Image (cartoon, rainbow, N blue to C red):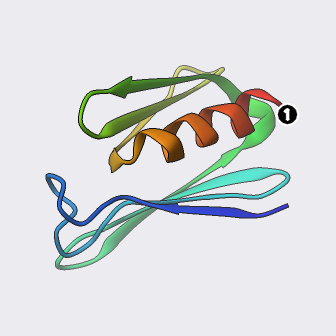
Amino acid sequence: MNYRFQALRITSGNLFFPDIIEITDDKIIIFKNKLIGSNKSIINRANVGSVTIDVSIFATILIETKGGERYVSNGFTRSDARKIQEILLNK
Protein backbone atom coordinates (compact mmCIF):
# COMPACT_ATOMS: atom_id res chain seq x y z
CA MET A 1 0.00 0.00 0.00
CA ASN A 2 1.24 3.52 -0.77
CA TYR A 3 0.94 6.52 1.52
CA ARG A 4 1.78 10.19 0.91
CA PHE A 5 2.08 12.83 3.62
CA GLN A 6 2.74 16.53 3.05
CA ALA A 7 3.87 19.03 5.67
CA LEU A 8 1.70 22.05 6.32
CA ARG A 9 2.66 25.17 4.40
CA ILE A 10 2.26 27.43 7.41
CA THR A 11 5.22 25.82 9.21
CA SER A 12 8.84 26.93 9.20
CA GLY A 13 10.66 26.15 5.97
CA ASN A 14 7.56 24.78 4.24
CA LEU A 15 5.84 27.93 2.96
CA PHE A 16 6.61 27.42 -0.73
CA PHE A 17 8.03 23.90 -0.78
CA PRO A 18 6.60 21.63 1.93
CA ASP A 19 8.37 18.41 2.86
CA ILE A 20 6.74 15.28 1.46
CA ILE A 21 7.09 11.73 2.75
CA GLU A 22 5.96 8.85 0.54
CA ILE A 23 5.83 5.32 1.95
CA THR A 24 5.55 2.21 -0.22
CA ASP A 25 5.77 -1.45 0.71
CA ASP A 26 9.56 -1.48 0.43
CA LYS A 27 10.85 2.11 0.60
CA ILE A 28 10.44 5.59 2.05
CA ILE A 29 10.96 8.61 -0.18
CA ILE A 30 11.54 12.02 1.42
CA PHE A 31 11.27 15.07 -0.81
CA LYS A 32 12.76 18.38 0.33
CA ASN A 33 12.27 20.93 -2.43
CA LYS A 34 14.09 24.26 -2.51
CA LEU A 35 13.91 27.43 -4.56
CA ILE A 36 16.65 26.01 -6.77
CA GLY A 37 16.78 22.23 -6.92
CA SER A 38 15.54 19.57 -4.57
CA ASN A 39 16.72 16.76 -2.34
CA LYS A 40 15.18 13.30 -2.69
CA SER A 41 16.19 10.65 -0.15
CA ILE A 42 15.22 7.02 -0.61
CA ILE A 43 15.39 4.66 2.37
CA ASN A 44 14.82 0.92 2.22
CA ARG A 45 12.16 0.12 4.83
CA ALA A 46 14.16 -2.89 5.99
CA ASN A 47 16.93 -0.46 7.03
CA VAL A 48 14.75 1.67 9.34
CA GLY A 49 16.15 1.49 12.85
CA SER A 50 13.87 3.93 14.64
CA VAL A 51 11.19 6.54 14.06
CA THR A 52 10.87 9.35 16.58
CA ILE A 53 8.30 12.12 16.58
CA ASP A 54 8.58 15.40 18.46
CA VAL A 55 5.14 16.87 18.89
CA SER A 56 4.39 20.43 19.91
CA ILE A 57 2.02 22.52 17.80
CA PHE A 58 3.31 20.70 14.73
CA ALA A 59 5.29 17.48 14.53
CA THR A 60 8.88 16.79 13.54
CA ILE A 61 9.72 13.30 12.33
CA LEU A 62 13.17 11.74 12.75
CA ILE A 63 13.85 8.54 10.83
CA GLU A 64 17.11 6.84 11.74
CA THR A 65 18.50 3.93 9.74
CA LYS A 66 20.30 0.91 11.15
CA GLY A 67 23.48 2.40 9.66
CA GLY A 68 23.05 5.58 11.71
CA GLU A 69 21.86 7.97 8.98
CA ARG A 70 19.27 10.49 10.18
CA TYR A 71 16.46 12.06 8.14
CA VAL A 72 14.43 14.91 9.65
CA SER A 73 11.21 16.41 8.29
CA ASN A 74 9.10 18.99 10.07
CA GLY A 75 5.71 20.64 9.86
CA PHE A 76 3.39 17.63 9.89
CA THR A 77 0.14 17.36 11.79
CA ARG A 78 0.21 15.27 14.95
CA SER A 79 -2.08 12.68 13.42
CA ASP A 80 0.05 12.37 10.26
CA ALA A 81 3.23 12.02 12.33
CA ARG A 82 1.71 9.28 14.47
CA LYS A 83 0.41 7.50 11.34
CA ILE A 84 3.88 7.67 9.72
CA GLN A 85 5.46 6.26 12.88
CA GLU A 86 2.86 3.50 13.09
CA ILE A 87 3.28 2.49 9.43
CA LEU A 88 7.08 2.41 9.60
CA LEU A 89 7.35 0.53 12.89
CA ASN A 90 4.77 -2.09 11.88
CA LYS A 91 6.68 -3.54 8.94
Count of numbered marks: 1
Q: Position of residue 6 (x, y in %)?
A: 44, 63
Q: Nearer the viewer, residue 12 or 69?
A: 12
**What secondary structure is found at the residue carrying circle 1?**
loop
Q: Residue at x 51, y 42 (%)?
A: 79
Q: Residue 14 is drawn in which quadrant?
A: bottom left
Relative to 18, is 47 above or below?
A: above
Crowdedness near tag 1: few (<14), some (14–19) or many (≥20) residues, C-alpha within 10 Å: few
* Image position of 53 (left or right of 35): right
Q: Residue at x 37, y 60 (%)?
A: 19
Q: Which of the 4 image quarters holds residue 66?
A: top right
The amino acid type, in three-letter code, at marker 1 is: Lys
Q: Is residue 27 visible?
A: yes
Find disc 1 in the rendering and name its residue: 91
Which residue is located at x 26 percent, y 72 percent?
Answer: 17
Residue 43, image x and y in percent? Answer: 64, 46
Where is residue 32, by image quadrant? bottom left
- Image coordinates for residue 11, horizontal then vertical, percent: 18, 54
Give the answer, above or below, for where 16 lies relative to 65.
below
Residue at 14%, 52% (x, y): give it.
Answer: 12
- Quick one: quadrant of the N terminus? bottom right
Q: Is residue 21 above or below residue 76?
A: below
Instruction: Name the spot of residue 10 as percent of width and height, x first.
Output: 17, 62
Nearer the observer, 40 or 74:
74
16 sits left or right of 70 in the view = left
Q: Is residue 70 visible?
A: no
Q: Residue furthest bottom?
A: 36
Q: Nearer the viewer, residue 71 or 73?
A: 73
Quadrant position of the C terminus in the picture: top right
